[in-house]
Amino acid sequence: MALIELQEVSKIFGFGEATTLALDEINLSVEKGEFLAIMGPSGCGKTTLMNIIGLLDRPSHGKYLLEGRDSSRLRAGRQAKLRRDRIGFVFQFYNLLPRLNVLDNVALPLAYRGMTPVRRAKRASDILELIGLRDREYFLPKHLSGGQTQRVAIARALINNPSIIIADEPTGNLDSHDSKVVMELFADLHRSGHTILMVTHNPELTRYASRVIYMRDGMVVEEESTSIGAIAKGALRTYLRKRKTTEEDVLAGVSALLKDVPGKAMTSEPKAKPKSKSKKRSRRALRKARR
């Protein structure tokens, strides 16, 4: 039995002439322990799909089975409990509370379970040790780098030991070095048996996935099983077509996954050419004529 199964799931927003079909009869199965990458252009329905799988939204039509149970028949309170205990979310923009320190941000989901403050702090400290940020426990989010902030967000997602991790563009705001660190964390989680669903636009991140699906106009138009360490062929074709370059250029370029690279030197923008005096005079004459 699949861990996640969507049967002809559709999602409609609005009504009448303002109706938008975000998902169009999606059929998708995800087995326990898979690392699934979801790719597609902006607006194709990737985030809507993740919201339904993460029990943040309900389908307009079709069934969503989580471990064989129809989620649409669950009450809101039961859905919230499943979402809290079984699913961890990692977002592109971190969503940490700015006035709480790192330890309190990570421990926050445990407060909703009624755990005592001492046990919450101990559990959060252990998770931060796991991701190498125990020495930042009492820092505020604004005092962390982008990569450190995303690692804190991952720690918060792991605090309840979820079986499913949903990551929506987790490296979208990170440089190459921090992207590598974050993706290695996801790789470790995958090896430990977690099921990971990741939305990404970066074809190189498909190196970590065991399967890639491609979406367009609210539909899954293609899927591809991949080998760990290899870029998905479909993602690479799209990248090459967009960039008008060769495969060798991509593999020989700066890789956030294979090596650390120093930051590129900033290049000054080309100076604008001075406007000719004749153009200035003609514009001045035109203004006078309009008066």
Image (spheres, grey):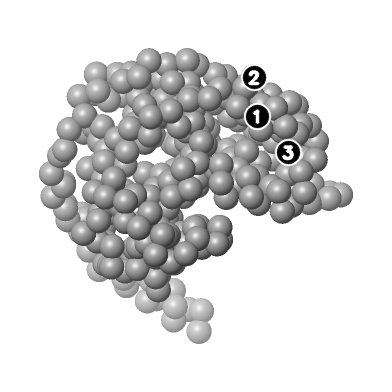
**Disc 2/disc 1 C-alpha distance (Å):** 7 Å
The residue lying at 66 percent from left, 41 percent from top is 52
Label placed on residue 1: 2
- Quarter occupied by the N terminus: top right
Residue at 47% across, 64% down: 116
Q: Secondary structure at mark 3?
A: helix
Q: Is residue 205 visible?
A: no
Reading the image, the residue beneath label 3 is 71
User: Quick one: 149 or 253, which is closer to the camera?
Assistant: 149
| Quadrant of residue 226 within the rendered picture | top left
Q: Residues within 10 Å of mark 1 (few under 14, many from 20)?
A: some
The quarter of the displayed image where residue 278 is located = bottom left
Sequence-wise, which precedes: disc 2 or disc 3?
A: 2
| Amino acid at circle 1 | Glu
- What percent of the width, then of the height, locates residue 257? 26, 32
Q: Determine whether the residue tagged by mark 2 lies in a helix, strand or loop.
A: loop
Provide the secondary structure element on which disc 1 rests: loop
Q: Badge 3 local density, few (<14 within 10 Å), some, or many (20+)?
A: many
Which of the two discs, 2 and 1, labels the residue nearer the N terminus? 2
The answer to whether mark 2 and mark 1 are in CB contact below 8 A is: yes
